Image (cartoon, helix red, strand yellow):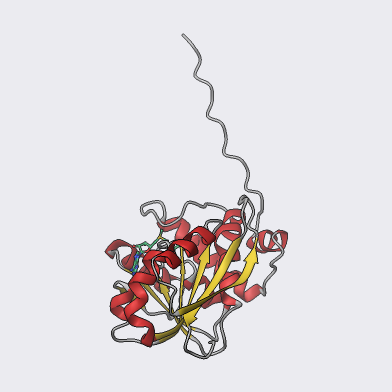
Amino acid sequence: MNEVPPPTPAPAPKFATLQEALTAHGAPLDDAIVAALDKYAQIVWEMNQSLNLTRHTDYDKFVARDVLDSLALAGQLKPGDEILDLGSGGGVPGVIIAILRPDVQVSLCDSVTKKAKALEEIVHRAGLSIPVYHARAEDLLEDFRYHAIVCRAVAPLKKLLTWLAPHWASFDQLLAIKGGKWVEERNEARHFGLLNDLQLRKEVEYTTPGNDHPSVVLKIWPAGRKEP
Ligand SMILES: C[S@@+](CC[C@H](N)C(=O)[O-])C[C@H]1O[C@@H](n2cnc3c(N)ncnc32)[C@H](O)[C@@H]1O
């Protein structure tokens, strides 16, 4: 009878601590912030065993995929800003921004019940005070006003701008994290006239490990208004 080979052990994680991973990625942070981010990551990883919230399972990927994007967005916010994370999923970028920038008031929303419930649990277990709405962002904008809508990996610009078009009175700017295809997305939105009355500027460009193309933070605001 053939012998069954023993299972290959999982490779050891690249970094033993979150601070080590942050430092290796050029983004060391204060110990209190690192502790809060670590708590969030542990909660998401634990909940991920039964829910599909993230595909990362170690500090290296958490920093490379989620923290670097959230830091890029967080750098665009002013003290006191009230922001809505459109389509938070497992809490990126909203929960991470709330930890990085306690001077900013973050709200989260997700249109899918399972995701909104998971977000409520994450926020509760992480000891954070962040409103979570089980709703489409467009519907929330009927009742609430924000300085900025932030979002990552929710929809192409054409879709986002179509959803948000009737609601510009309810927010000052859209700050969207986009990957290498952002120029195509912008051109498509332009082609459909969705940028006719808006200004769009690439505010930040940065590279993340494992991605051939840089990521960007796009800032979009109404053309007739003072730049936020
Ligand atoms: C691919 S996930 C991305 C989650 C997270 N932003 C991230 O980057 O990891 C997109 C999420 O947006 C939610 N979503 C899509 N359209 C939405 C809308 N109009 N309002 C609120 N949530 C929405 C989906 O339910 C899903 O959880």
Residue 205: % across, % down: 64, 66
Lateral position of residue 150 relative to residue 13, left or right:
left
- Identified at 54% across, 76% down, the residue is 99
Q: Residue furthest top?
A: 1
137 or 122: which is nearer to us? Answer: 137
Ligand 1 image-quadrant field: bottom left
Residue 204: % across, % down: 62, 70
Residue 215 falls in which quadrant of the image? bottom right
181 or 199: which is nearer to us? Answer: 199
Residue 51: % across, % down: 36, 54
9 or 110: which is nearer to us? Answer: 110
Q: How many marks?
A: 0
Residue 118 falls in which quadrant of the image? bottom left
Residue 142: % across, % down: 28, 84
Lateral position of residue 24 relative to residue 197, left or right:
right
Lateral position of residue 197 relative to residue 116, left or right:
right
- Identified at 56% across, 80% down, the residue is 101
